[in-house]
Image: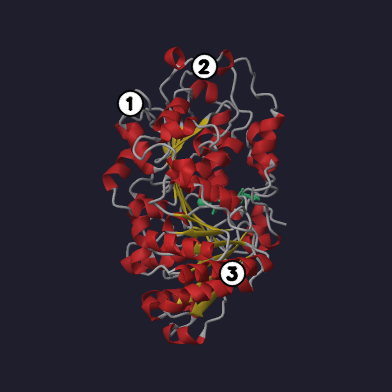
Amino acid sequence: MRDALADVTNTQTEASAIAREKGWVAPEGYDYEKYTAAPPGEKTGEDLQEDESLPQWAANAAKYEWKDEYGDVGPENPQLEEQLFRSEFINRTGLKIGNLRNIQVTNESRERPSPIRDFDDAGLHPIIRNNVRLCGYEYPTPIQAYAIPAVLTGHDLIAIAQTGSGKTAAFLIPVLSQLMGKAKKLAAPRPNLAAGFDPVTDSVRAEPLVLIVAPTRELATQIFDEARRLCYRSMLRPCVVYGGAPLRDQRDELQKGCDILIGSPGRLLDFMDKPHILSLRRVKYTIIDEADEMLLSDWESDFNKIMSGGDVNEDADHRYMMFSATFNKDCRELARKFLSDDHVRVRIGRPGSTHANVKQNIIYSDPHMKKQCLYDLLLAMPPSRTLIFVNSKNQADLLDDYLYNLGLPSTSIHADRTQREREDALRAFRTAKCPILVATGISARGLDIKNVMHVINFDLPSATYGGVTEYIHRIGRTARIGNEGLATSFFNDKDSDIAPELVKILIESKQEIPDFLEQYKPAGDVADFRDDETDDENEKEDGDSKEGAWGGVQVGATEESAPAESSGWE
Ligand code: ADP
Ligand code: MG
């Protein structure tokens, strides 16, 4: 027994030495004490927050606090500005931004607001124009070029654009810009925080003007971060609500006033059941991010409740927007039920396409060899931020332990970890303290982390795990906003159900097809299947192209407008 233990220790020491030699930083021990100092069951999330040695919750991050005496624009706050805009961990535009631009834009609706070429010609409110500058966004991305004018001209919108192409700012910029001039008139009364805040006498009910819903907690907090940047120096006050973190802190924030509410569905519904804390009666814009995921989840009645503003919404001119990189026909049909007839539909590229900036490799590996294969792959590459996807929570834990024991700096994120652990893991990954993150599908969508150079599908997402749609979102965690990245997937015979669709994606994005996938190649030409997901085809097949399922009349009319001309990418 002793000898066996000694062997394990020796092997671990050797493995650690190898990992260091290859340049990987040392893994940090997991501090279980931090989370379990009180007997199990006695320590709640709320107690944890009071322990100042712990990092704060994402929901409590600093935001610009407006004071009543400010005129139209609040004064600068250099310290906050530094924190919001100049963190070294914010993604910056990469050199291959041109690949995002040379892509076909399809506007399928009757309504076609002209795309903007430049943030200067969009008629934006000066505060937001300045915040866009502070963010370092020089030119609108194609989806922004089309979505901004659509929202500014008062349309509902369905927007489909590839992963990492700036969809968050595409809805935040125009919505915030429209509200900035009117916030004083539209916003609910709220306490003057300049005079100090006494929760007993000063608390107000949150009555946001904008509601943004995202499928996961981490994505909701990321949208909140972008909203904190874009609301800087304005009186619009963003808040985020999500499960797993203390309800009390989130309630306290809401009670100081909330104009922009971002939430993951569960916690949002909790608050909607407490009308003395939150009312959606003033909401003017409802935005659903990753809309196809939200529409297909098993919570139709909850979704209806959110979309109707909890039945109390008073705004006759309520606008709805839905965004995603993937939007299959079923989802599009569901989506149209919620949008007005004159909504705008824009898609950049084919729905569900990946972009040229991700290099996709598929490696054959028998199930029992996958771990070894992963280890060899990690050591063969220069150390870099690497996101590894698996299909189960248990597998995530096992793989994290396996890598950790081999001296590799890994951590993991999945739905059975506490929210504190999830936020810690993500923070450690973002700051490269733990450059290897093992994750389940909860992290597939939306997360925007700088310098993720490599996404590895340790398990490919078979049909039960979201299939090729999930694959697209997973590999979209790398190569964001003009950066390049690598996606490696382990394939074996168990993955054959995803193979035909996977091969189509590879062909379309001009990737190499390994021999073992040759048999899954479609018979026809690439062009034969390229458009099989588009509305034009579907509508024609359905024979209802006039009153097309998307609600437009000129269904299928395609503007082959090179966004180069229209969006100002240079
Ligand atoms: P998507 O939702 O399409 O996947 P995100 O909204 O997460 O993409 O944006 C990806 C990254 O691009 C973010 O880091 C964001 O700050 C950045 N970004 C957004 N718009 C621009 C722009 N116009 N120019 C440069 N960077 C941008
Ligand atoms: Mg997004």
Q: Secondary structure at mark 3?
A: helix
Disc nearest the viewer among 2 and 1: 2
Tell which circle, 2 or 3, labels the residue nearer the N-terminal end.
3
Find residue 477 and report its horizontal and vertical position in percent. Answer: 54, 59
Is the Cβ of the residue at disc 2 closer than 8 Å to that at disc 3? Answer: no
Disc nearest the viewer among 1 and 3: 3
Q: Is residue 76 left or right of residue 520?
A: right
Tell which circle, 1 or 3, labels the residue nearer the N-terminal end.
3
Please give the name of the residue rendered at 45% of the width and 17% of the height, measured from the top-left corner.
199
Tell which circle, 2 or 1, labels the residue nearer the N-terminal end.
2
Q: Secondary structure at mark 1?
A: loop
Kindly tell me whether mark 2's CB lies below 8 Å from ligand 1. no
Please give the name of the residue rendered at 45% of the width and 29% of the height, measured from the top-left corner.
249
Please give the name of the residue rendered at 43% of the width and 87% of the height, measured from the top-left corner.
519
Dot 1: few (<14), some (14–19), or many (≥20) neighbours within 10 Å? some
Q: According to the image, label 1 marks what residue?
A: 275
The three-letter code of the residue at mark 2 reads Phe
Residue projecting furthest to the left: 301
Find residue 170 and report its horizontal and vertical position in percent. Answer: 56, 46
- Nearer to the camera, 210 or 12: 12
Q: Disc 2 and disc 1: Cα gap in Å?
A: 21 Å
Q: According to the image, label 3 marks what residue?
A: 15
Quarter-of-image position of residue 125: top right
Residue 131's mark? none
Q: Disc 2 and disc 3: Cα gap in Å?
A: 54 Å
Q: In the displayed structure, would residue 411 be above or below residue 514?
A: above
Q: According to the image, label 2 marks what residue?
A: 197
